[in-house]
Image (tube, rainbow, N blue to C red):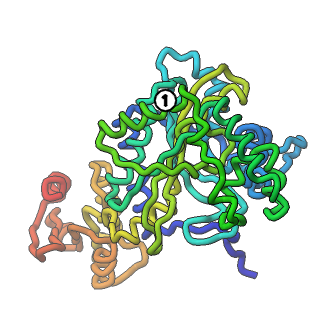
């Protein structure tokens, strides 16, 4: 029986891999511009990390995590998101004690959630995310938003919309929390089982419910904006003012709550086109209590995460083509047994000089070798046969214009480097 790939996963084939490489290279380039450094964490962590860090009232923890026990009877989970792991590493490695603060970090890697597979949503997916830990300056909120927008625009996306909200500080959230309970409690029996469980523990999550989003009480629910205290209003005003000075446009959405329990103060999403509709490309926000929740000192933080799969869909919808698949600098065509022996030596010489080069390994005829050179998008073909070996020269054909030169073996590397 043929073994097939697990549902909700996919292979990135060689003809598409260059797109991923371009996106990842752009992410690293933009992070360098903003002075963010890469941090790599394990793909699996203690289950408790995500229960405490993401929040046990979230759909991620309740329904979507891939959890298992190892041979030591330890409960582990494939990471469903990146922030909790970054904060765990920040605490465990005492990065809060480093002289360079805030710690500005980024990650790129696979995440895992047991969801119903659909376009842009897979059970294994790839996230690029940034986290800034250690600063409560509203300008870093604006900076991390600017970083995300810079990344998308550098890849060619134009139809982007930034949506902002504030969830306020703990005092503001508590006041809003009580107002939401009072609003929903009389009719909570009309809501789904998940929302009924969330009512007392985290009523804010009711606003993010997909099953009940059309319930009439959703439209009249108390807005967090009306419950922000003076300090929270002042902070949010400063973030908005800095974005305005940067020339970054945004829309305010008081219903934007995000799906994770750790957010407070600034929350944001960037919307874009996907399959003809507007969808969320990425999201993020401030999480000032998460470091202490995971055993570290009181430390402010802010970050975002985005899906590379959704980015690829958005690029396709906007008709944006990434750079084409890389081509070879040259392809060596060998004619005859002696030339076949010489070709690997010549090929190694070219590669050691930094030229992208290849040859035929399938015993093709000359015509077939030239066809393979075309498939590999080779810029030049280096032809060697008995006559060329005797003369210690190769025939070099320019595949763009069809012109040919005879080039001594000793000068071949310099010739190709100059022409490329």
Count of numbered badges drawn on the protein = 1
Look at the image and tell me whether residue 342 can be seen.
Answer: no
Look at the image and tell me whether residue 312 can be seen.
Answer: yes
Q: Position of residue 9 (x, y in %)?
A: 63, 67
Horizontal side, residue 153 vs residue 74: left or right: left
Query: Considering the numbered disc 1 on the image, is that residue within a helix, a strand or a loop?
Result: helix
Q: Nearer the viewer, residue 3 or 91?
A: 91
Q: Nearer the viewer, residue 230 or 40?
A: 230
Q: Which residue is mark 1?
A: 235
Q: Position of residue 420 (x, y in %)?
A: 18, 58
Q: Position of residue 190 (x, y in %)?
A: 81, 64
Q: Which quadrant of the view contains residue 363? A: bottom left
Q: Residue at x 56, y 55 (%)?
A: 126
Q: Residue at x 72, y 54 (%)?
A: 206
Q: Nearer the viewer, residue 110 or 147?
A: 147
Q: Residue at x 46, y 51 (%)?
A: 163
Q: Position of residue 278 (x, y in %)?
A: 46, 66
């Amino acid at each position: 029986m043929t073994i097939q790939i697990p549902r909700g996963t996919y292979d990135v084939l060689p003809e598409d891999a260059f797109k991923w490489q371009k996106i990842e290279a752009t992410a690293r380039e933009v992070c360098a511009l903003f002075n963010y450094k890469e941090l790599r964490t394990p793909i699996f962590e203690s289950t408790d990390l995500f229960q405490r860090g993401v929040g046990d009232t979230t759909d991620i923890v309740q329904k979507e995590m891939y959890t298992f026990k190892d041979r030591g009877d330890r409960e582990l989970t494939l990471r469903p998101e990146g922030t909790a792991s970054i904060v765990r590493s920040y605490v465990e490695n005492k990065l809060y004690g480093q002289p360079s603060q805030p710690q500005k970090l980024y990650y790129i890697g696979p995440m895992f959630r047991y969801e119903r597979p659909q376009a842009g949503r897979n059970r294994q997916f790839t996230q690029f995310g940034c986290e800034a830990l250690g600063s409560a300056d509203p300008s870093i909120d604006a900076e991390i938003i600017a970083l995300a927008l810079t990344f998308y625009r550098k890849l060619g996306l134009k139809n982007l919309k930034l949506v902002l909200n504030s969830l306020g500080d703990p005092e503001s959230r508590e006041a809003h929390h009580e107002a939401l309970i009072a609003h929903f409690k009389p009719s909570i029996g009309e809501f789904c089982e998940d929302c009924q469980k969330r009512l007392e523990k985290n009523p804010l999550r009711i606003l993010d419910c997909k099953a009940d989003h059309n319930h009439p009480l959703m439209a009249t629910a108390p807005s967090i904006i009306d419950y922000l205290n003076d300090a929270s209003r002042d902070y949010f005003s400063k973030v908005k003012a800095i974005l305005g000075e940067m020339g970054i446009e945004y829309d305010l959405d008081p219903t934007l709550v995000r799906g994770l329990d750790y957010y407070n103060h600034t929350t944001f999403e960037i919307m874009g086109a996907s399959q003809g509709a507007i969808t969320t490309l990425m999201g993020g926000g401030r999480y000032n209590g998460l470091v202490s929740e995971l055993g570290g000192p009181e430390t402010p933080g802010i970050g975002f995460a985005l899906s590379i799969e959704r980015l690829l869909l958005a690029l396709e919808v906007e008709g944006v083509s990434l750079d084409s698949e890389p081509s070879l600098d040259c392809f060596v065509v060998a004619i005859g047994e002696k030339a076949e022996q010489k070709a690997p030596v010549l090929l190694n010489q070219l590669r050691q000089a930094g030229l992208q080069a290849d040859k035929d390994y399938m015993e093709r005829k000359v015509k077939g070798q030239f066809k393979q050179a075309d498939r590999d998008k080779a810029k030049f073909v280096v032809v060697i046969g008995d006559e060329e070996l005797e003369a210690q020269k190769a025939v070099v054909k320019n595949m763009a214009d069809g012109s040919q030169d005879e080039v001594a073996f000793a000068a071949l590397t310099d010739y190709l480097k100059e022409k490329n």
